[in-house]
Amino acid sequence: MAGALFLAFHAPAGLVVLTGRAIGVVFLFMGAGNLLRFMSELRSVRGAFALARAVCFLVTGAIAIHWPAHAEDVLAALFCLVFIVDGLGRIGVGLLLRLPDLRWRLLYGSVQLAFAVVFLAGWPLPLERSVALCIGLIFAFRGWLLMRLGLLFRTLDDDATILHLPMFATRGWYDRSPDLADTTGAPTVAHPMVVHVWTPVGSAHVPHRRLLLDRYVAAVGADGMISTGHASLEMLPSLYISHYPAVELDRTGEDFVGALRSTAENDVKGHFQPSYAEEAAGWCEADGRVEFHNFSPRQLQAFWARYQQDDTYNLTNRNCSVVVAQALDAALEGSLATRTPWLQLLMLVANPDVWVAALLRARANLSTWTPGLVLDYAHTLARIVERRDVSWPDSLHRFMQRVGLARRKSPDGALP
């Protein structure tokens, strides 16, 4: 945090220019990645978006490197644009979904917009210092989070689950998580834990595709009804987690927007499906499947015993995907326990898949878990905890896919 304040208020002009040029190099790499993606998808909408991003990144990077006198203004304007877009996005999503932490979202978004206005006004710092201030704020915020996390871990009992820490309590998703973590390490299991996912586009006849919306949000079927897909989790022989509304909800566009609010008025009675075989027979086979062998059956059973005490279903805050994500977190906690925790921590920090999982969680916390997000989350966690032979460059490539810098390898947009 001290370094953040130094960058913001006392960094010498040379360091500010060097920072701008370093960011320019990053933009050039990002532009080159998007340009390669455009060349591989010349006749697609994704290719057009990739070309637009490539032009913006390359132009900005060239200005930052070759015309440092103007680069500071350009980079400052970009930071302002990011603050404006992210702030408006947080406020818009919060108002649309009426999430439990709406006040904090409105406050956070308003602060971002206020920073953007202050930067553009050139007060209390001149515009050319805005880049250093933004970097300083990022360092300060991350430093505060690490300090808070460290203090919380110091007060956490050895056998207590981390899912009851305040940072997980915002949405109320983990209120029914087990109180104690399995500290004995993941045992040898007789049956795998399987995540089944029906993506929106895979569970309905969709005549007109809408790129990422069809996979990660909802798809409009040929009859005009909206399909959000479904997700479930299975551990044979007798545990099946599948939360569904007791009465099938067929919604059109206007009804769907109203149902997105997470308020109590949209709570309906839910139903827990008995098994995957019965669910697939009554609907269709899932188009996504992920297996886990390194997990704690006891923690999974403890979570499910608590969760099924309340069958309330809410499309945004208590849906099928939310419970599957919670079950994964509960079952996988402690699965990587080792006698050398610090070495394990360093290996995890250097694993790009961990950052992919964090990005997916951030997107879910911004709005909610959807079947498409859960499928990607499950694939990512499986690569982490199953200790599969995945090279570091492959993991880095998947991380670049997530931030839009590399081409996806699978035709349906799924992470391989």
Image (cartoon, grey):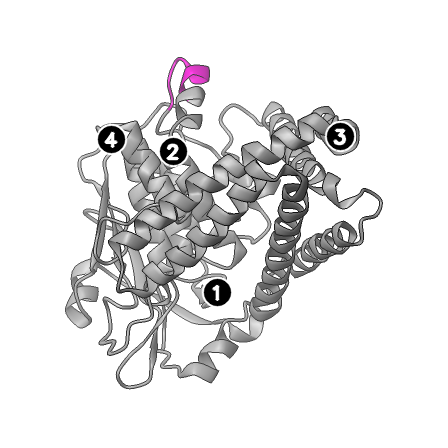
| Residue kind at label 1, given as amino acid type | Thr
Residue 343 on the magenta span: yes
Q: Are marks 4 and 1 in contact (CB under 8 Å)?
A: no
Name the one closer to the observer, 243 or 78. 78
154 above or below 383?
A: above
| Residue kind at label 3, given as amino acid type | Leu
Mark identifier at residue 352: 2
Residue 70 on the magenta span: no
The mark closer to the camera, 2 or 1, is 2
180 above or below 244?
A: above
SS at mark 3? Answer: helix
Whether residue 295 is visible here, answered yes or no, is no
According to the picture, the residue beneath numbered tag 1 turns out to be 316
Sort mark 4 into few (<14), some (14-19) or many (20+) by Cα contacts within 10 Å.
Answer: few
Number of residue marks = 4
Mark identifier at residue 390: 4
Left or right of 207: which side holds 56?
right
Image x and y of residue 161, in percent: 49, 34
Residue drawn 32% across the image and 45% down it: 378
Quarter of the image where the N terminus is located: top right
The segment highlighted magenta reads: 337-344
Q: CA distance from mark 2 to mark 4?
A: 11 Å
| Residue kind at label 4, given as amino acid type | Val
Name the one closer to the observer, 95 or 300. 95
